[in-house]
Amino acid sequence: MTTPAPVRPHLVSFDTDSFVRPVHRMVWEPVPHPLPSSTPVARRLLVIGSDAELAAEVASALGADLCVPGREPERDDWDGIVDLNVVGVPYRFDGGEWRDALARTTRMVQRRYGAWGADPRADRSCYVAVTAMGGLMGYHDGPIGSPLGGIWAGFAKCLPRELPNLAVKVLDVDAVGQARLAELLTAELAAWDLFEIGYRQGVRHALAARPSPEPPPRVELGSDDVVLISGGARGVGFALARGVAEEFGCRIVVTGRGELPADARWLTMDDAGYSEYCRARVRSARTARELRDVRAALKRETELRQVGANLAAARRDGLRITYEPCDCVRPEQVDALFARIPEPSVIIHNAGIDLPTRLDNKSPEEVVRTVDVKVTGFANLTRAVLRARRDTVKVFCNVGSLAGRMGGMIGQIDYAAGNEALTRLGFWARNTHGLPVQTLCWPTWERLGVIANYDAAVRYVSTVDPAEGVRRWIRELRSGGTGEVMFIGQIGSALVPTQLRGFRLFTGHPDLPRLHGLAHFLGAVELFEPSRELRSSVVHTPGAHPCLAEFTVDGRAALPISVLIEQACSVADWVVPPDRPPQHLAEARDVKVRLPALILAPSGSRFTTRALGETTEQGWSVQVTIKAETGETAASLRLLYRSSSPVPPQPVPPSVARGVPPSGGRLDWSGLVLGAGDALPTVTAADLWTSPFPPEHGIAPAALDVMVRQAGPVTGDVVEIARIVPYPGAQQVDELRPVAGGWAGLRSGRQVLSVEGVAVVPAASSSAGKRATSPEAPFSP
């Protein structure tokens, strides 16, 4: 059954019965981007580097501890790490310095992993990866001195998935010098904005994404072409192999790490027999170690069964797809492969492994091994091409991932590092050797690929249909294009606040309104503890937006009550249960708003929102408190969420007659946006906010303000609302009907909102104080 549309539209990104969505083709490019206002923070830093002399000079300039080959610090109380990794070390095909550097990075981050993960303060801890790829992150046509900086770029961008309060940045420079590096680092450590920053000829740049149309075909493929796909015997690689063989009749060579077993009994069993065989093997294990070994063996056997089935199906269909054993990490095996097969005209580096475990549970050797398949595999294939006739290669395609480009899911820091390195290595091979290298960054393919935890993966981004993936892949191969292309569908709900900040220059995507809406009321995050608490602050300035020029308290500009409630709901949306189930806002209870605290200073007033979540008998509950800049509480309320939307009563409750409230009091509305008197205008997000992507509201703002007006004249300090129930469609109300105990909000005759107990009381009074009367009859715009 399809999940009902939630009241607040960003809580469920797509139907949980189908995660497949069309993908958008996007490219990234460097653009000038100024340094934002900075707030220096005293931190104890650690500088890591393979170039011991450079690292020591930078550490001395920053007053930091030092970690270089042969020297690791005894203490581990650093607030941040500045990672110079392999900066200063020239890239070579057979260079192994990066392995030691990555293992060193892993050890140092692991030493602080627990403390950083436990610290709820936002941006207190930090990780900065310095790279030397020309100051434009490799996105240019000139020399790229150290393309392996891409490893640390991917590593850094994925860290916030596991350490959500960690401030991260990739700093790319066009010249390596101690004085300049220290100067740039001092500035960037005080200003946390985008994840990827570069300096070229003194100009600060960032990476921006934009849509890009599909390219026209320029490369012809036919039966004479040989297509080599590393790791292509199953998953997405084999899906492409079949697609190319079927459409063009090419000879396809797919590879795997070893020989295929010829006479293993489990290879030819039917599925039922193999399932029983697996159960028996598991039952036979006597110790935990035996069980672990059995499961690893069964995993490999299952993979080989899939390879065998794929090849058998290809033979039955008359496709020219053959298998060759070759571990692409082993240079002698790659050389032997090129000696056995005809010269390939298309090379696709698809091999990869994924060990989905948090970084603190991985050994440095496991991290290096995951990256090795991507980085060393590329080096060995590229070297083999350069030794052969490079002019016969029509296209060299790296299979990258969104995990590298925008950060993967929990457990994918090393996978992200390896995939991001492919993009920068592709730039290097194109710029240095003229090879036609393209890198395609894919989301998860529906039920294909190396992703071990599909159910977790789809929380991050929608999947791509394999048929669409193959079609787009073939189009990219035939374009002969070089550089990087990213394919992305719908962005999921598993976001952390730092990611919104880190990728703000993400343009032209249909999800932009939702993402900017999430960021609008979030403002500056001060504290974040996933599934428990978030505290953030935002500044509201009189007249900056239409809704901030609408409402006054005692004749002074003030924040409208409806906007304040929306801010509370928006911040609370970030505090979700641990497993991130679909959540629907069911009701708001015990709403209390202190009117004097809503008054805005002429230069703007800061409002700090604290949302604290917990599981209760009634469902997931978030207590929200908003404090004004003066320190006084502006509002408090409790939000309840449930797994399905609340159901409105049927039929709509009848109207009740009430006395007409007298006019006047402390509050006034201009009527330009939220109406005045009993007017109930239709209000859109663009009516309230002049932002390029104004935040959509979840509860009709004009309806809330009308109810407050009808409780007048307001002479007290506190507005109380006992209960607000937003049914699906509560974003707009075209009729308010007074009912027993409160109000019913209708939309096209259907109830979409229920509000109980609206009252204005003195600050010292309790919510049981006398409540003002409401209007006699319903009113419409």
Image (tube, helix red, strand yellow):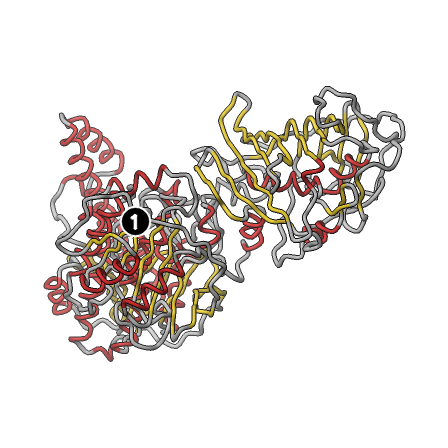
Q: Is residue 623 visible?
A: yes
Whole-percent x, y for residue 39 in the image: 46, 54
Quadrant in the picture for residue 215: bottom left
Relative side of 43 to 93, left or right: right
Q: Is residue 53 left or right of residue 707?
A: left
State the image coordinates of residue 654 (x, y, percent, origin top left). Answer: 82, 26
Q: Position of residue 633 (x, y in %)?
A: 62, 34
The residue at 25%/57% (across/down) is 351
Q: Is residue 190 above or below residue 306?
A: below
Quarter assignment of residue 70: bottom left
- Residue where numbered disc 1 is placed: 450
Q: Residue at x 14, y 40 (%)?
A: 265
Query: Front-most of 326 and 226?
Result: 326
Q: Nearer the viewer, residue 605 or 586?
A: 605
Q: Residue at x 55, y 46 (%)?
A: 522
On screen, 435 above or below 71? below
**Is residue 778 shown left or right of residue 14?**
right
Residue in the foreground of this view, choosing between 395 and 729: 729
- The three-letter amino acid code for the residue at tag 1 is Val
Report the number of discs: 1
Q: Residues within 10 Å of mark 1 (few under 14, many from 20)?
A: some
* 554 to 257, vertically: above or below: above
Question: In the drawing, does residue 656 fall left or right of residue 246?
Answer: right
